[in-house]
Image: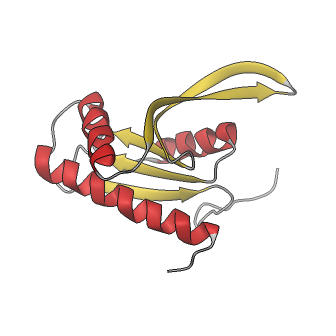
Amino acid sequence: MNTDERGYDDSLTERVLGAVFEVSNTLGAGFLEKVYERALLRELGLCGIRATAQASFAVTYKGHHVGEYLADLLVEDVLVVELKCAQRLTNEHTAQCLNYLRASGRTLCLLINFQTPKVEWKRIVLGFQPASIQGGSQ
């Protein structure tokens, strides 16, 4: 694997996903989001991965503080992790992750859904949009 910054992000993503799968395999589906957040935070710690729960990101508008976002987890100060317990992942969940990235100045987010028997996940990179999402001009 590359040792550049992108390679580090890819390696970190893989390690975090390993912890996600361990939590999912151990707990299964059906718990509240907070249970998965605490379990994942614990599992990341057991794996030697530094993570902070409820990471706060300030939202500014034209130089003024107008609010804040609380992401479920911030891993190694580079990877935002947003947890869901939903029927399925939606475009609104993806938009929420993109807003976290814009507010935090980070570029990478993992969106995780623990509600289904097989955990769902999506890797979101700020500045990258699949062709199906790109639209017309404003």
- Please tell me in which quadrant of the rendered image residue 53 appears: top left
**Side of 82 relative to 23 (left or right):** right
Question: x, y percentage for residue 20?
Answer: 29, 52
Residue 79 against residue 39 in the figure, above or below: below
Q: Is residue 33 visible?
A: yes
**Side of 88 relative to 72 (left or right):** left
Residue at the image position 73 percent from the left and 19 percent from the top: 66
* Nearer to the camera, 118 or 63: 63
**Side of 41 relative to 129 (left or right):** left
Question: x, y percentage for residue 10?
Answer: 49, 67
Residue at the image position 43 percent from the left and 45 percent from the top: 50
- Please tell me in which quadrant of the rendered image residue 130 appears: bottom right
* Nearer to the camera, 36 or 129: 36
Residue 3 against residue 42 in the figure, above or below: below
Residue 84 against residue 129 in the figure, above or below: above
Q: How many marks?
A: 0
Residue at the image position 53 percent from the left and 56 percent from the top: 124
Q: How is the image coloured?
A: secondary structure
Question: x, y percentage for residue 58?
Answer: 67, 27
Q: Residue furthest bottom?
A: 1
Residue at the image position 60 percent from the left and 60 percent from the top: 133
Q: Residue furthest right?
A: 62
Q: Is residue 28 visible?
A: no
Question: x, y percentage for residue 118?
Answer: 20, 57
